[in-house]
Structure formats: structure tokens, C-alpha cells
Image (cartoon, rainbow, N blue to C red):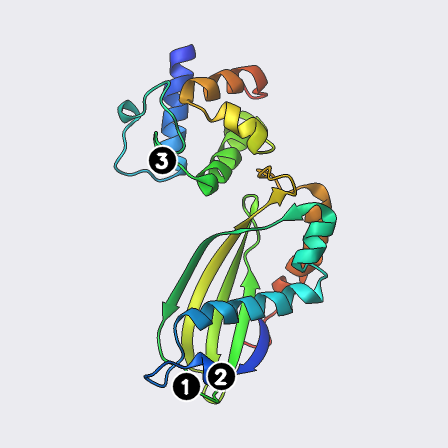
Amino acid sequence: MADDLVGELKKLIIETLKLEEITPEDIEDDGQLFGDGLGLDSIDALELVVALEKGYGVVIPDSEVGERVFRSVITLAQFVREKSTTK
Amino acid sequence: MKYDETEIKVRFNEVDSWGIVWHGHYIAWFEVGRMALLKKFHLLPQDFTQMGYIAPVVDLKCFFKEPARMEEEILIRTSVLKPTKAALTFRFQILRKKDGKLLASGEETQVLLTLDGRMLYIIPQDLRERLQPLFNYLEEPDSAA
């Protein structure tokens, strides 16, 4: 189910980046992940790319794709749904 | 993890009015170590540019433990962690040569960009192949340890 994936990805973000003070409820589905939103940076993106490839078999090759995919948890979920080889 | 070693001598222009090396110079010494290591594997900045990449620094840490003084001979030890993501993380140790005392240690991370500014999230195969001899060298037993 779509909502399950959004929740799953929020947990993956928190666990991968060790965001100890953040819960999945703190992350808005359509809120910005980088910059003003959750405040992630370029190194965080690299960590997430590795975790997403391991967990879902999706490849995000560069920032051109990344900027679209990492816009929010919703855009990330859409990308994973389209490209995942494990689900 | 093996460290590559290079030597320098503290110059007059590197010490402050307290007679000890000004903290910013340790970062320049990291750069001396990094270039000495990368030169051995033809991975200098111009080599990266020729391949179509640049590798800007995004994170830098330095821990200062003991001061270095003028004319002291310094060992700069440099290594690189095997990448788990599309970034290169260098580790540095600054030692006083005469007694091997650790004066400072640090870490620096560089990411990979194409020449038109696209950040790479995966290390491209051509660069991976160019980096492999460096990692093979760093996996050899550390004779300096």
C-alpha cells in the first residue's frame, strides 16, 4: 500500500541518517527533505542512495535525478514504486 | 589501515606569536600529505579534471593535541577510507618526527562532481578503476605503524 511505503521510507531516512530526535510523524509527506525542510545535506543524500539501493534495488545516479526524487517523501515513494526491483 | 608518509620542516612563517604553529597550517599540511599520496597514483586534481570530475571538500575536522614548533621535523601521515558511498574520506596524522608524538589528527571528505556541477551519487566505473591501485596500496601491511 502507498501509505506503507511512505512510512517505511520515513523510517529508512531516520535510521540511515541517525536522526535521533526525529520521529516519522515529524516528517511531512510533501515537506522538503533538503535545505529548509528536514535540513538534509549532500552527504546525507549519498547515505540515502546507498540505503535505497540496498533496500529497494533503486539507483539514483546523480543530483540531477536526486533533486527530483528527494524533493519529498512522496516523490521518493513514487520513484521507488516505479523503479524498485525488490517489491 | 596503511598510512602514506611525507615529511616537512616547520617554517618561520608558520608559527604564531606564541612560538607554536598556527592552527590553520595543519590543514595546509593535510593538503601536502594528500597531494603526495595522490601523486603516486596519478590522481591529482588535474587528473580528476581530465577524467571529467572535480572533488570539492565538504567536511573537514582537525583535533589538536600538542603544538609543533619552528624547525621541528614533521611527519604527515595520510590514508583514505575505502568508500561506502560516493565520497572520498581522507584521514591524517601529524607527528613530531624525533619522538613520534602525535600532534594532530584529522579527517576530510570530498564528494564528486562533473565539470558542469552535477553531483555524482555513485562512483563511476572509470574512476573506480583508477582508484583501485590506491586502495590496493593502502590495504598492504603498514610498515610505518
**Of the image marks 1 and 2, the number of the one nearer the N terminus:** 2
Labelled disc at residue B10: 2
Regarding mark 1 in the picture, which secondary structure is present there?
loop
Disc 3 from disc 1: Cα separation:
41 Å
Q: In which quarter of the image is residue B65?
A: bottom left
Relative to A64, does residue B29 appear above or below in the rendering?
Answer: below
Regarding mark 2 in the picture, which secondary structure is present there?
loop
Q: Which of B139 and B109 is in front in this view?
A: B109
Residue A67 location (% of width, % of height): 51, 28
Q: Which of B19 and A1 is in front in this view?
A: B19
The answer to whether residue B140 is visible is no
Q: How many marks?
A: 3
Describe residue B81's horizontal placement relative to residue B50 as left or right.
Answer: left
Relative to B48, does residue A52 appear above or below in the rendering?
Answer: above
The answer to whether the residue labelled 3 contacts the one labelled 2, judged by CB atoms less than 8 Å apart, is no
Labelled disc at residue B69: 1
The answer to whether the residue labelled 1 contacts the one labelled 2, judged by CB atoms less than 8 Å apart, is yes
Work out which quarter of the rendered image holds the N terminus of chain B and state it.
bottom right
Residue A32 location (% of width, % of height): 38, 26
* Other residues around mark 2 within 10 Å, as few (<14) / some (14–19) / many (≥20): some
Q: Which chain letter goes with mark 2?
A: B
Residue at the limit of the structure toward the top, as seen here? A1
Q: Which chain letter goes with mark 1?
A: B
Disc 1 from disc 2: Cα separation:
7 Å
Residue at the spot 50% in from the left edge and 53% down from the top edge: B109
Residue at the spot 27% in from the left edge and 26% down from the top edge: A26
Q: Name the residue under label 3.
A: A39
Relative to A46, does residue B36 appear above or below in the rendering?
Answer: below
Residue A4 location (% of width, % of height): 39, 15
Residue at the spot 37% in from the left edge and 26% down from the top edge: A10
